[in-house]
Image (spheres, rainbow, N blue to C red):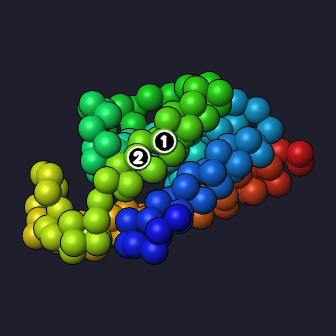
Amino acid sequence: MSNSLAADLALLLDRDLSKLADELGMYPDDTSVWRVGGTIANSAGTLALHLVGNLEAYVGTFAETGYVRDRDAEFRDRDVPREELLEHIARCRRSVANGLATLTDAQMLEPYPKDLPERFRGWTTHRFLTHLAGHFLWHLGQIDYHRRLLVESLGA
């Protein structure tokens, strides 16, 4: 693997997408992936859909996958079987790898070339994709805690 900004991000995002799949696999069953309670509004399944949607939309787009994001569905859809979530993650891993493989260091240092929410406009591709990697890890940590607390409460 080359030593480039995009290659570094590809390596880290692939690692983190793999960990997301591992986390979902450690839930006791499909139903528990979708459990919420107390002040927890987003299930692990919801966060997984959101993370994949985010990366497909903003990183996979460089691979011209044709992915069309439905952010509202990421937070609305429920009871998607774990196997289907894992398929989404596997597809996202390919999209991210292929998308980042198209970027040079020079392109990474240019403004992100596609439409972004207002607060990110003008950011370089590198800064925005680094932000996405941090955002991914924040939610991955939430999933880990969600799973451990859930399993503990179930006595499993």
Q: In the figure, 79 relative to 118: above or below? A: above
Q: Position of residue 144 (x, y in %)?
A: 66, 58
Q: In the figure, 28 relative to 143: above or below? A: above
Residue occupying image coordinates x 49% and y 35% = 91
The kind of secondary structure element at disc 1 is: helix
Residue occupying image coordinates x 70% and y 37% = 32
What residue is pinned by disc 2?
98
- Mark 1 neighbour class, 10 Å CA radius: few under 14, some 14 to 19, many 20 or more: some
Q: In the figure, 11 relative to 22: above or below? A: below
Q: Nearer the viewer, residue 70 or 104?
A: 104
Q: Nearer the viewer, residue 40 or 128?
A: 128
The kind of residue on which mark 1 rests is: Arg
Question: Is the C-beta separation of discs 2 and 1 under 8 Å?
Answer: yes
Relative horizontal placement of residue 147, taking residue 77 as reference (left or right)? right
User: If the image is split into quadrants, where does the C terminus sit?
Assistant: top right
Question: Is residue 134 visible in this depiction of the protein?
Answer: no
Q: Position of residue 21 (x, y in %)?
A: 65, 45
Question: Is residue 81 visible in this depiction of the protein?
Answer: yes
Q: In the figure, 57 relative to 2: above or below? A: above
Residue occupying image coordinates x 38% and y 54% = 101
What residue is pinned by disc 1?
94
- Mark 2 neighbour class, 10 Å CA radius: few under 14, some 14 to 19, many 20 or more: some
Residue occupying image coordinates x 38% and y 65% = 6
Q: Name the residue furthest right.
A: 155
